[in-house]
């Protein structure tokens, strides 16, 4: 099972200046719970914005730079190579960034989308691809109101490929 996990806004914004736009502790807690114990695949920029391998996960960094190396991480030069490195895993998560999401969707490599939808629009420089309802069926949704810790209303939405 290959799952894209992403937090996006109503206008599909993902981030700006290689950073997250919003801070939602509930989303970060869920991300940790869902991805712990699994392989997480990401582009080099996403890894560098995180800054280190995440605990209790195997980080696979996708980069075209054949000399790139990071302690504690696996390196792949394509999304297909990253998936090959992860093939013995039952569940693999693609955690970003925008180029990796687009490649995975365009190349029909993904079984499921695990989306945190932030009910707000943001100025951004990277965006998530449009979720095509002819390809993706919403199978679950949990809605949450903003509170003292989470500044925005948000939803956890799961999609399965039709």
Image (spheres, grey):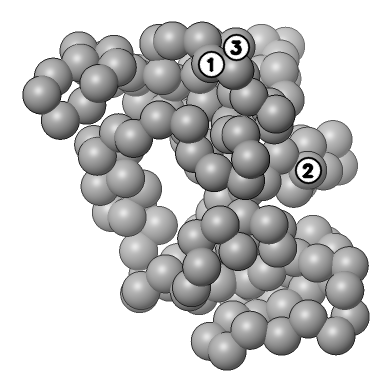
| Between marks 2 and 1 in the image, the one whose residue lies nearer the viewer | 1
The residue tagged with tag 1: helix, strand or loop? loop
Which badge, 2 or 1, comes first in the chain's sequence?
A: 2
The reply to whether callout 1 and callout 3 are in contact (CB within 8 Å) is yes
* Residue drawn at (68%, 69%) of the image: 61
Coordinates of residue 22 in the picture (x, y in percent): 40, 30
Query: Front-most of 107 and 64?
Result: 64
- Relative side of 58 to 47, left or right: left
Coordinates of residue 112 in the picture (x, y in percent): 57, 37
Coordinates of residue 71 in the picture (x, y in percent): 57, 89
* Residue drawn at (34%, 35%) of the image: 23
Q: Which residue is mark 1?
A: 122
| Between marks 1 and 3 in the image, the one whose residue lies nearer the viewer | 1
Q: Quadrant of residue 157?
A: top left
Residue 118 appears in the rendering: yes
Q: Which residue is mark 2?
A: 99
Q: Residues within 10 Å of mark 1 (few under 14, many from 20)?
A: some
Q: Quadrant of residue 63?
A: bottom right
Q: Which residue is mark 3?
A: 11
Q: Residues within 10 Å of mark 2 (few under 14, many from 20)?
A: some
* Residue drawn at (63%, 84%) of the image: 70
* Residue drawn at (35%, 74%) of the image: 56
Q: Residue furthest bottom?
A: 71
- How far apart are the alpha carbons under marks 2 and 1? 19 Å
- Relative side of 105 to 151, left or right: right
């Amino acid at each position: 099972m290959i799952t894209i996990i992403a937090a996006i806004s109503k206008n599909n914004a993902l981030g700006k200046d290689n950073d997250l736009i919003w801070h939602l502790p509930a989303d970060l807690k869920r991300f940790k719970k869902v991805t712990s114990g699994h392989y997480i695949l990401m582009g080099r920029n996403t890894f560098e914005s995180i800054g280190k391998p995440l605990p209790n996960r195997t980080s696979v960094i996708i980069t075209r730079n054949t000399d790139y190396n990071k302690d504690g991480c696996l390196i792949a030069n394509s999304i297909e190579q990253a998936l090959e490195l992860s093939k013995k895993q039952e569940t693999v998560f693609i955690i970003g960034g925008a180029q990796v999401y687009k490649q995975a969707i365009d190349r029909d490599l993904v079984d499921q989308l695990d989306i945190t939808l932030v009910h707000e629009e943001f100025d951004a420089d990277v965006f998530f691809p449009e979720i095509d309802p002819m390809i993706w069926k919403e199978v679950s949704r949990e809605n949450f109101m903003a509170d003292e810790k989470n500044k925005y209303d948000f939803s956890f939405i799961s999609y399965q490929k039709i």
